Image (cartoon, rainbow, N blue to C red):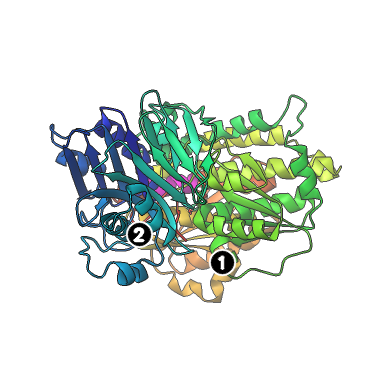
């Protein structure tokens, strides 16, 4: 969601910024723009609706610069258009700015301070640059005007801001609150970006910024001040990730690459968390803190929430601690009655999701301990929680989450096992997680190797479908709702994940001749029941696809799942569902990696 890059001091500003924007494409966007200035009086502002490729077409050979800012916008206020794309410019043409986040009180600010100013866009963002222009015209320095404008932004505002003053194009002004932003330290120049991935080609050393901080960045100076104006010294952290980890290689789409990577991610997690003796090695302090709690609250959004539903089964079974799973956006404003000693787990691939962060802020204010399970080291939720566990899944670029989902479930299993073992529980001791995750990895591999079969099923049943259902019971229901989300978000087929037994209580009215119904059956104890639900939909004309564990499978079942531990079946059952979604999207001619209206990192509430 909205990507920001900036640089100061490098003669190849255009090349650097466009490369950075391309690396941030995965976040989702609908327009893009760039401003560069060569510090000799030449400057260029180029914006477009649509893809970065469109922006590149508009960048002629004469466009060059030594300082610049660039942006991909995901529309919130105002339609996707060149006018609404960033950078925005102050009315007098002096200040150029890009913004990620939301200015909640932009209408009030417009009315109070800017009634005589002409706005070029419908965005909330433009108000900030117009305020700076106004305050500077009244005699404030660029920095003072920048700070004053920021001080007026409402309590609920979120922002990552980069600004260039045309009259002093040697300094990049930077500010951050809630929205992610990092300074990249380079040799002879400096960069800014919303995600380290954008600048890994020029540096691996980044300085994190805290909320309320303001930075003056030149080619050889990084001057940070806190919200009270005190200077801040902060050492860079090193990002070891290889820039090539975010390349597509021979794959046509990141989604397929990431589906294929899942067996390797399972093995990597075993390597990272399990020692030679089969013991799960997790910070003892974290384990003890969880053991002291009387209830675990798992908070997450979207696919991560679905991973939480599966994790709930694992934690209660092996760690024996009552666990509740909550949708972050609901929890923040409709908080349930909390137990006396709660412990919070935030599941978040990106570590930046605003809905989850809103809950973490509340948890921190209440003084409760928390853990963030994330794929992104040093992400906001990782920094702000008491503890962090990493997913080690490698960059997930496709908007639809695949490998982060399975990695989240595996890390929850590892955590549950570590607690259960520490407490001496028999069920946990008998759970040989190294063996179980290796079996899962092999099972996943078998399934990803069956791509052609799944592609054919998608062609037959989904390529022309209008709506579809996934059904399952118990843990298969948890998988079914994630499978349904995957299918609907990339293929735009309206899909519901349904508790198989609940269908007959109303929703079965929607089943008609040819409606695809995909059932998931892995649990022996309720297999017979789901089988009767299959009969019910077939009798009403549904096209049935059954995804069934090998011990329960019959000749009629189209997809057979290799046997894995009963509480880890989601890890294998989701693979054909991810592939069905992928192929349905491709066959219907959609942009698989960047589905419409979606963003990878959802940094607005
Ligand atoms: C769906 C998807 C989203 C995310 C959700 C939370 O494929 O990716 O539903 O799971 O936006 O994001 P994170 O996990 O980054 O907090």
Residue 221 position by quadrant: top left
Q: Which residues are magenta?
A: 576-584
Q: Residue at x 28, y 67 (%)?
A: 114
Where's residue 320, x and y in %? Answer: 80, 52
Circles 1 and 2: CB atoms closer than 8 Å = no
Helix, strand or loop under label 1: helix
Where's residue 51, x and y in %? Answer: 25, 46
As rendered, which of 360 and 93 lies closer to the eye?
93
As rendered, which of 513 and 103 lies closer to the eye?
103
Numbered circle sitting on residue 358: none
Where's residue 313, x and y in %? Answer: 70, 53
**Residue carrying label 1:** 330
Marks 1/2: CA–CA distance: 32 Å
Dot 1 or dot 2: first in sequence order is: 1
Image vertical order of residue 134 relative to residue 334, above or below = above
**Residue carrying label 2:** 465
As rendered, which of 416 and 134 lies closer to the eye?
134
Residue 250 position by quadrant: top left
Q: Residue at x 71, y 49 (%)?
A: 314
Q: Residue at x 70, y 40 (%)?
A: 414
Image vertical order of residue 114 relative to residue 290, above or below = below
Q: Nearer the viewer, mark 1 or mark 2?
A: 1
Instruction: Name the side, left or right, on which 418 lies relative to 44.
Output: right
Number of residue marks: 2
CB at disc 1 and ligand 1 closer than 8 Å:
no
Q: Residue 570, can we see it?
A: no
Would you say residue 580 sits in the magenta stretch?
Answer: yes
């Amino acid at each position: 969601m909205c990507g920001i890059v900036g640089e100061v001091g490098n003669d190849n500003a255009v090349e650097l910024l466009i490369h950075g924007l391309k690396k941030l494409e995965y976040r989702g966007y609908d327009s893009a723009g760039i401003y560069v200035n060569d510090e000799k009086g030449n400057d260029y502002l180029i914006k477009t609706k649509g893809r970065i490729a469109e922006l590149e077409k508009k960048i002629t050979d004469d466009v060059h610069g030594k300082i610049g800012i660039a942006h991909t916008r995901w529309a919130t206020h105002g339609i996707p258009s060149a006018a609404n794309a960033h950078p925005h410019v102050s009315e007098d043409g002096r200040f150029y700015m890009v913004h990620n986040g939301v200015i909640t009180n932009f209408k009030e600010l417009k009315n109070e301070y800017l009634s005589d100013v002409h706005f070029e866009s419908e965005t909330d963002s433009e108000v900030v640059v117009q305020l700076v222009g106004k305050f500077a015209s009244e005699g404030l320095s660029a920095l003072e005007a920048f700070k004053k404008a920021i001080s007026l932004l409402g309590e609920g505002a979120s922002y990552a801001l980069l600004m260039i003053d045309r009259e002093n194009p040697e300094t990049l002004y930077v500010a951050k609150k809630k929205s992610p932003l990092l300074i990249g330290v380079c040799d002879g120049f400096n960069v800014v970006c919303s995600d380290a991935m954008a600048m890994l080609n020029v540096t691996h050393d980044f300085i994190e910024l805290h909320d309320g901080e303001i930075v003056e960045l030149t080619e050889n100076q990084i001057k940070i001040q806190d919200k009270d104006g005190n200077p801040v010294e902060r050492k860079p952290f090193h990002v070891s990730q290889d820039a090539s980890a975010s390349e597509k290689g021979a794959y046509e789409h990141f989604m397929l690459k990431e589906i294929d990577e899942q067996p390797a991610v399972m093995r990597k997690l075993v390597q990272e968390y399990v020692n030679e003796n089969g013991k799960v090695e997790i910070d003892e302090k974290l384990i003890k803190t969880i053991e002291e709690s009387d209830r675990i609250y798992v908070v997450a959004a979207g696919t991560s929430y679905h991973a939480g539903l599966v994790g709930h089964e694992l934690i209660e079974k092996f760690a024996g601690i009552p666990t509740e799973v909550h949708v972050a956006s609901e929890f923040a404003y409709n908080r349930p009655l909390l137990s006396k000693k709660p412990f919070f787990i935030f599941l978040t691939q990106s570590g930046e999701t605003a809905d989850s962060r809103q809950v973490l802020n509340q948890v921190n204010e209440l003084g409760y301990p928390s853990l963030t399970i994330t794929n992104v080291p040093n992400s906001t939720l990782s920094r702000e929680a008491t503890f962090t566990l990493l997913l080690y899944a490698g960059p997930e670029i496709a908007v639809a989450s695949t490998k982060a989902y399975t990695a989240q479930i595996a890390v929850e299993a590892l955590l549950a096992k570590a607690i259960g073992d520490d407490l001496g529980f028999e069920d946990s001791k008998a759970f040989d997680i190294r063996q179980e995750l290796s079996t899962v990895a092999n099972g996943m591999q078998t399934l990803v190797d069956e791509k052609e079969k799944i592609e054919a099923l998608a062609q037959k049943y989904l390529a022309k479908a209008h709506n579809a259902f996934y059904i399952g019971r118990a843990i298969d229901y948890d998988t079914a709702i994630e499978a349904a989300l995957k299918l609907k978000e990339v293929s735009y087929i309206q899909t519901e994940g349904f508790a198989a037994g609940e269908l007959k209580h109303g929703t079965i009215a929607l089943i008609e001749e040819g409606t695809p119904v995909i059932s998931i059956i892995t649990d022996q104890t309720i297999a017979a029941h789901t089988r009767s639900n299959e009969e019910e939909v077939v009798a009403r004309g549904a096209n049935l696809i059954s995804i069934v564990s090998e011990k329960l499978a019959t000749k009629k079942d189209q997809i057979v799942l290799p046997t894995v531990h009963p509480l880890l079946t989601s890890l294998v059952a989701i693979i054909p569902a991810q592939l069905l979604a992928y192929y349905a999207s491709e066959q219907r001619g959609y942009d698989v990696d960047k589905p419409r209206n979606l963003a990878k990192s959802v940094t607005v509430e």
